[in-house]
Image (cartoon, grey):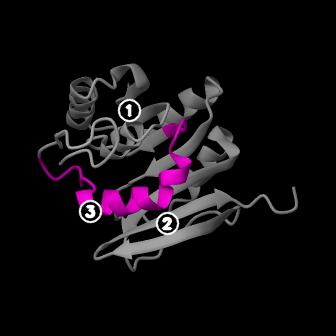
Amino acid sequence: MRIIAGEARGRRIDAPAGRNTRPTLDRIRENMFNILQADIPESRILDLFAGSGALSLEAISRGAASAVLVDSDRKASMIQKQNAESLRFNDRTRLYCCDWTRAIRTLQEEKQKFDIIFLDPPYAMTDLRTVFTSLIPLMEKESMIVLEHEAGKSVSVPPEFMIVKDRSWGFCAVTVYRLNTEGD
């Protein structure tokens, strides 16, 4: 895998070995960032189920201010640390090796806010209502959740969220959500 654009363009990053993670393919990441390019500069990123950290690291390379990477898999966290250090992004990244619920609780206690939240859960995890609801306190009015999921599969999210963009490439789909703030 490699960083596609920005200050670390062309630099290689590693992915954890084994079947516990599913790295986002370079071409999917490139298409995803084409959709998000105007929102990336100076953004604060939260990357849940971060795996190798490719999405966050790509965002930082393209101008994001900072990223928090969360994954419960120890090997994935070690790879994230290694990738951040090799790209010299460790001053702009924070790593949490824990369950997503614990990380969100900690971030809420710290009153953290994020502009872009990447979600790349296991494809079998299709009921995301609890995850989305728990993210609301971490969101600003214009924040977005970028969900990577299996194409053609239905995903459950709370009614407070509206789809802004929806794209698919082969077996992979990306749906961008925002809080529905109409009537505020």
What's the CA distance linking mark 1 and mark 3?
A: 29 Å
In the drawing, does residue 53 fall left or right of residue 59? Answer: left
Q: Return the residue nearer the eye: 102 or 118.
A: 118
Mark 3 belongs to which amino acid? Answer: Arg
| Residue visible at 53% across and 62% down in the picture | 176
Seen as rendered, the residue at the extreme right is: 183
Q: Which SS class for mark 3?
A: helix
The mark that comes first in sequence, 2 or 1, is 1
In the drawing, does residue 55 fall left or right of residue 27? Answer: right
Q: Nearer the viewer, mark 2 or mark 1?
A: 2
| Residue visible at 12% across and 44% down in the picture | 17
Tell me where the magenta segment starts and ends, as one range. 18-45
Position of residue 118 relative to residue 75, above or below, is below
Mark 1 belongs to which amino acid? Answer: Cys
Q: Position of residue 6 (x, y in %)?
A: 35, 41
Question: Which residue has dot 2 on it?
Answer: 175
Label for residue 27? 3
Seen as rendered, the residue at the extreme top is: 91
| Residue visible at 54% across and 52% down in the picture | 38
- Quarter the C terminus occupies: bottom right
Question: Which residue has dot 1 on it?
Answer: 98
Q: Return the residue nearer the eye: 50 or 35.
A: 35
Q: Which SS class for mark 1?
A: loop
Mark 2 belongs to which amino acid? Answer: Thr
The mark that comes first in sequence, 3 or 2, is 3
Q: Pointer 1: residues within 10 angstroms few (<14), some, or many (20+)?
A: some
